[in-house]
């Protein structure tokens, strides 16, 4: 465990950093900051990290994620954060060297518990914002050790490795290609893509109309 004074100093700095980005400090930012610091305590890491020792896999985007960034120093741009959008205020923190992983999520009753820690606030928003800052971590969160489905080396991959897709010709970096039937393919060509070229989308729409 980290010394309490060090952790509290890191928390206050993280609140300031996150609030500066959002122009206010909301309850989910507080949860992100507290969760990040708690993960560091469990894993024996001092945050925000200066090196790339920890990967954060965050299960939603938005202000909660920014709280984790402020607390941990894990960032998408530094390849130390990934978003697996499950729509959950939860995250898994992984020691890259060993693969040890801890998933942390809020307890399901924290909104009700918050009333006990900040009973005199004028509304629920203020109650949660204040209470989440002072509640003990073990009253806020569930933390369980987990095993990643993918090896951590495959998730991190090797930065800068480049190949070209045999179908569309576009460059693929960071070992994100898919190899099948002696072909090198990008994800967009090998699997259903999140987009269609406009002309294809129009053809698909017209075909659907003609079949009605």
Image: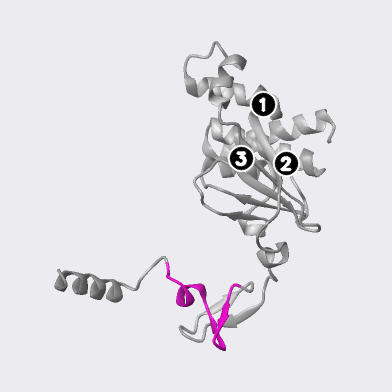
Q: Residue at x 48, y 21 (%)?
A: 124
Write the start and end of the magenta stretch as one range: 176-193
Q: Nearer the viewer, mark 3 or mark 1?
A: 1
- In what element is the residue under mark 1? helix
Task: Decide which of tag 3 and tag 1 comes sooner along the chain.
Answer: 3
- Residue of label 1: 139
Disc 1 + disc 2, Cβ < 8 Å: no
Is residue 51 shown above or below 27? below
Residue 88 in the image, given as x and y percentages of width and height: 53, 43
Residue 89 in the image, given as x and y percentages of width and height: 55, 40
- Residue of label 2: 39
Distance of label 3 from label 1 (alpha carbons): 19 Å
Q: Nearer the viewer, mark 2 or mark 3?
A: 2
Q: Residue at x 55, y 54 (%)?
A: 84
Label 2 crowd (10 A; few <14 / some 14-19 / many >=20)? many
Tell me if residue 180 can be seen.
yes
- Residue of label 3: 67
Residue 164 in the image, given as x and y percentages of width and height: 55, 83
Q: Nearer the viewer, mark 1 or mark 2?
A: 1
Q: Picture quarter containing residue 20?
A: top right
């Amino acid at each position: 465990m980290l010394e309490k004074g060090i952790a509290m100093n890191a928390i206050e700095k993280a609140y300031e950093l996150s609030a500066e980005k959002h122009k206010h400090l909301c309850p989910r930012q507080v949860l992100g900051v507290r969760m990040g610091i708690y993960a560091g305590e469990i894993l024996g890491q001092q945050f925000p990290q200066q090196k790339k020792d920890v990967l954060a896999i965050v299960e939603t985007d938005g202000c909660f994620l920014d709280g984790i960034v402020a607390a941990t120093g894990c960032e998408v741009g530094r390849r130390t954060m990934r978003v697996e959008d499950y729509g959950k205020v939860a995250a898994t923190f992984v020691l890259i060297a060993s693969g040890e992983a801890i998933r942390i999520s809020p307890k399901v009753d924290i909104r009700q518990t918050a009333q006990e820690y900040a009973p005199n606030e004028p509304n629920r928003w203020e109650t949660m914002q204040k209470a989440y800052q002072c509640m003990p971590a073990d009253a806020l969160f569930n933390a369980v050790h987990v095993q990643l489905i993918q090896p951590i080396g495959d998730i991190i991959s090797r930065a800068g490795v480049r190949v070209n897709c045999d179908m569309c010709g576009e460059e693929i970096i960071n070992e994100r290609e898919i190899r099948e039937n002696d072909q090198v393919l990008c994800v967009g060509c090998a699997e259903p893509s999140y987009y269609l070229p406009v002309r294809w989308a129009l053809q698909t729409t017209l075909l659907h109309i003609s079949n009605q």
